[in-house]
Amino acid sequence: MTLLLSSFILSVSGLLVFIWSLRHRLFNATAAAANVIFSPGEIGHGEEPAASPQQRAGLALPVAGQDRRAPSDAERAAMQQELAERVEADRSSAFVTFVFLSCSVVWLLVATAAGLTSSIKLHEPDWLVQ
């Protein structure tokens, strides 16, 4: 009961924080919000590791309305350094992410079993009393 109550309170408080952040315009719903996740000069450079060379060439085609100047060597070196830092950050958080995902799956299964058990007990009160 404590677990269910605490998870409910956590879910409701998370929802309230999300609504509060939307009301205070902490999320930008326009297309310009996508530019926040890119570094200067990074837009237009595909990082799809599963793409074939032909697909990468297709991803590099210009989009109407974008200025496509070639980055300088200094910009290219800075982008490579930042990309290496991102890869390292992704590697360092991979195990923690896996643990949280695994715990969430386990708790999903436990909560589903608890809900099913309580539902069956409401319909069949003599179930599991032997």
Image (spheres, grey):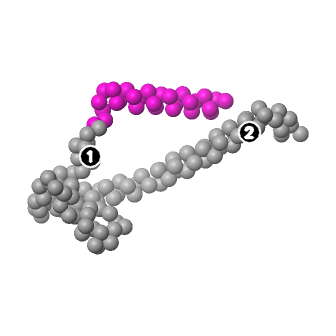
Q: Position of residue 111 (x, y in %)?
A: 64, 40
In the displayed structure, does residue 125 sit left or right of residue 45?
A: right
Left or right: residue 58 versus residue 104 is left
What residue is shown with label 2?
117
Q: Residue at x 23, y 60 (%)?
A: 45
Q: Residue at x 73, y 35 (%)?
A: 118
Identify the magenta region: 1-28
Q: Residues within 10 Å of mark 1 (few under 14, many from 20)?
A: few
Point out residue 44 in the picture as x, y percentages from the top left corner.
21, 58
Residue at 39 percent of width and 28 percent of height: 19
Label 1 residue SS: helix
Magenta: main secondary structure: helix
The reply to whether residue 109 is in sight is: yes
In the rendered structure, which amino acid carries the disc numbered 1?
Ala
Q: Say above or below: 118 vs 42.
A: above
On screen, residue 1 above or below 108: above
Task: Of the two numbered discs 1 and 2 on the same chain, state the one appearing first in sequence.
Answer: 1
Q: Nearer the viewer, residue 120 or 73?
A: 120
Looking at the rendered image, the quarter that the N terminus falls into is top right
- Kindly state the secondary structure of the residue where label 2 is placed: helix
The image quadrant of residue 20 is top left
Residue 116 as seen in the image, left or right of residue 107: right
Mark 2: which amino acid?
Thr
> x and y percent of residue 119 in the render?
73, 35
Mark 2 Cα-neighbour bin, 10 Å: few <14, some 14–19, many ≥20: few
Q: Quadrant of residue 58?
A: bottom left
Q: Residue 34, which numbered label?
A: 1
